[in-house]
Amino acid sequence: MKGVLQKIGSLRTTGRGPSADGGGDPGQQRGSSVTLSIIDQHVARLKQAEEARKAREALLTGLKPFVLDNTLVECLASGSETLEDKLEALSCTRACGLQNVVLAAFVKERTPDLPFLQALHSSKLIDEHCFAFSELYDAHGSDLPGQDLPFGLAKMIQYGIQNAILEVDVAAPYINWDKYHIEDLCALVESRCRWVASNLYAGRPTQPASYVHLRDFSAAMQSAPARLLTLVEALARLDPAVRPRGLLINQPAAGQFPFEAAPCVAAVRGVMDAAGWSEGLLAVHVGSAPGYGLAHATVLECLAAGCGGVMAALCEEADPASSHASSMLDLVNLARLGNKHVGERFHMDRLRAAAKQVSAIMARAKAAAAAAPQTAAAGGSAGTQRGAAMTAVEPPTGSPAKTLPRAIPADQRKLLIPGHA
């Protein structure tokens, strides 16, 4: 028994760390100090990360977000919606406190609903909180932008829309940037802003406003960051009477991680502040790829990096060509972080119901669009049978047979203004 206890005692002393009086193996002491040094480094990094997290959280909780509602353009622009559908959706968004609304997009590959705009204009529902997109230029030569006034700005005068969102591409591949310098682009954007300030009063005392949408922001920050930031600085140094009210940036979530957006946003915000445009709005529109779940995380990254608001539709459902992170979830995420301003400025209890209502409108429009070809086919079949019966009847003697008139198929009709009506 005594031998067993001696063996246990030897096992206890083996592997024991250095004693308090400095005894023990010097090699073990060096190993422990190295281990403690590595641990201390990582603990310090964790503390730094925690401080950065607290700072970002404080910024997000204190943010008074600007929300530009894009529901009518991103969710209800398929052409299958009725006038009543769009009026109902507009009522839903405004009931939630979303007063700043985009009514139309006079841009490439989109046909705005002119009867809807006419109905709003006739009912005096278009006010100083209504916006519309316009191309910076409608046409371009072989490799240079056109200089004529774009169609969208002319239509804004017609319908009394005071807030123009100018679509700007800073890295357009069809422009020869060796011939068309950044100074030329800055001059063109400035001329459009001056035109807006002089012409879009619409009979209201409110000052017209222009916003610049950097449509290819993500691509431009990768291929031509200096060109984009030069444009931002030039706009920041314009006379406040003609300077844009703010910048809108388009940040796709597909193919990028959220943390990749933050340095780009911070660079733009830094140039704006350094050039004396700290009051200028910087809002983000985040496109989404269904199933990846990065869109709303990207929104929070952009807001924490310097954006002061979002441009988004109320619900997630949208045209596949313009999928996005919804404003409903953006506002809910801010509220969950403890942002009290969101609850004060927007009716959070109505957001979900309104989003469901807009989704129902979209579903109804899609169902109507799917049923339309079947109805047309059925009508065509019945018309063919009726036509056969009519041709089987011989005309009265002395009256020549007449060819029945045929309707022009919808796909063969020519538009009055290609691409716009």
Image: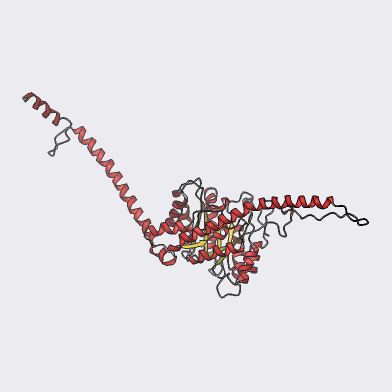
The C terminus, quarter of image? bottom right
Is 333 on the left-hand or right-hand side of 376?
left
Q: Residue at x 44, y 57 (%)?
A: 303
The color scheme shown is secondary structure
Count the labels in the image: 0
Residue 173 vertical position relative to residue 138 in the rendered view, above or below:
above
Which is nearer the eye, 367 or 43?
367
Is 6 on the left-hand or right-hand side of 402?
left
Is 107 on the left-hand or right-hand side of 94?
right
Q: Residue at x 70, y 57 (%)?
A: 418
Q: Residue at x 16, y 36 (%)?
A: 18
Q: Residue furthest right?
A: 398
Asked whether the viewer can see residue 41, the reply is yes
Quadrant of the rendered image containing residue 206? bottom right
Residue 33 vertical position relative to residue 59 in the rendered view, above or below:
above
Q: Residue furthest left?
A: 2
Asked whether the viewer can see residue 314, the reply is no
Quadrant of the rendered image containing residue 64? bottom left
The N terminus, quarter of image? top left
Quadrant of the rendered image containing residue 185? bottom right
The image position of residue 221, as x and y in percent, is 52, 51
Which is nearer the eye, 110 or 212?
110
Which is nearer the eye, 80 or 31?
80
The image position of residue 396, as x and y in percent, is 90, 56
The image position of residue 373, as x and y in percent, is 67, 51
The image position of residue 211, as x and y in percent, is 55, 63
